[in-house]
Amino acid sequence: MRTRRLALAGFLFTVTLWAQRVTVTLAATTDLHGQVYPYDYYTGRPANRGLAKIAALVREARAGSRNLDPGPNLLRILLGEPAAGDRSAPAGLLQDRIVVAETSIDDMNPELFGYVMEKLFAAGALDVIWIPIHMKKNRPGTLLQVLCRPDLLEAIVDCILTETTSLGVRHYEAGRCMLPRSAETIETSFGKVAVKRVCSTRGEIRRVPEYEECRRVALEQNLPIRVVYDRIAGEANNLTKVPLPDRSGP
């Protein structure tokens, strides 16, 4: 295996890139802008620091003798956080970062999609979306898009590659703004049911019935689920009660 040594000044470590081992010495500085560039970012004026200083440090710390003229025998790395990550959320909203993992599928039995969705939710997915698309050679396909927290990306990718015919998964981070919400249990004419309490940016409160609760009540009471939903939503938000259909007939 070939070994290349790249040097700046400061501390030394070795990494492996493809089939090559690269030994890198990084500049031990906490102010890369001032040390590398011949001007001060904050004042916009020239500074008595810059490339000349870096060149002197490189000459002192450079390892190896390979001549890469006209390029320098060094690697510069800038480490920092994306500017978008420092932005504050709009007033009244919560903010976090999630990962979007997605893949395009054109050779899988769609009857299996429901099972895959269940497995992804069991692996920790926040949401699972199936989107009809057209792929190469004008083949109809499906875009599988999964939202998850960054620490669960590995589990989600493993689930996609195991449970589908996909050969690869794209993933990227995305910012997310959300209305504050919480779970509540309220008393209704159907008994106690779970609802979601949501607060708008104007401070308005609304309560949204949970689907599973509406489904349970509809089956227990032999009522249309839309009627159950409207009744619970009306009572939860202090609206006019929705009359129940007459089920006393033959």
Image (tube, rainbow, N blue to C red):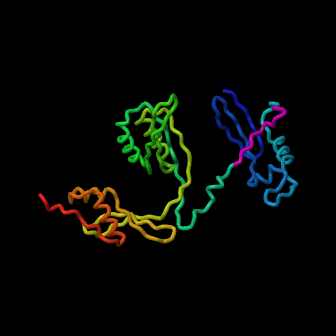
Q: Residue at x 71, y 42 (%)?
A: 12
**Location of residue 119 in the rendering, given as x and y in whole percent from the top left corner:** 38, 43
Q: Residue at x 36, y 66 (%)?
A: 184
Q: Quadrant of the C terminus?
A: bottom left
Indicate whether 49 appears above or below 193.
above
| 87 displayed left or right of 117 | right
**Location of residue 142 in the rendering, given as x and y in whole percent from the top left corner:** 45, 38
Say which of 149 and 201 sits in front: 201
| 158 displayed left or right of 96 | left
| 111 displayed left or right of 16 | left
Indicate whether 201 appears above or below 145.
below
**Location of residue 109 in the rendering, given as x and y in whole percent from the top left corner:** 37, 33
| 57 displayed left or right of 135 | right
Say which of 225 and 8 sits in front: 225
Q: Which of the 4 image quadrants contains residue 211?
A: bottom left
Indicate whether 205 appears above or below 151.
below
Q: Main secondary structure of the magenta part?
A: loop
| Residue found at the very far left of the displayed protein | 250
Q: Which of the 4 image quadrants contains residue 85?
A: bottom right
Say which of 96 and 104 sits in front: 104
Start and end of the magenta stretch? 68-78
Q: Residue at x 48, y 38 (%)?
A: 133
| Residue found at the very far top of the displayed protein | 1
Q: Quadrant of the N terminus?
A: top right
Say which of 32 and 222 sits in front: 222
Total numbered badges shown on the rendered structure: 0
Q: Residue at x 62, y 60 (%)?
A: 87
**Location of residue 230 in the rendering, given as x and y in whole percent from the top left corner:** 32, 63
Residue 70, magenta (yes or no): yes
Residue 49, magenta (yes or no): no
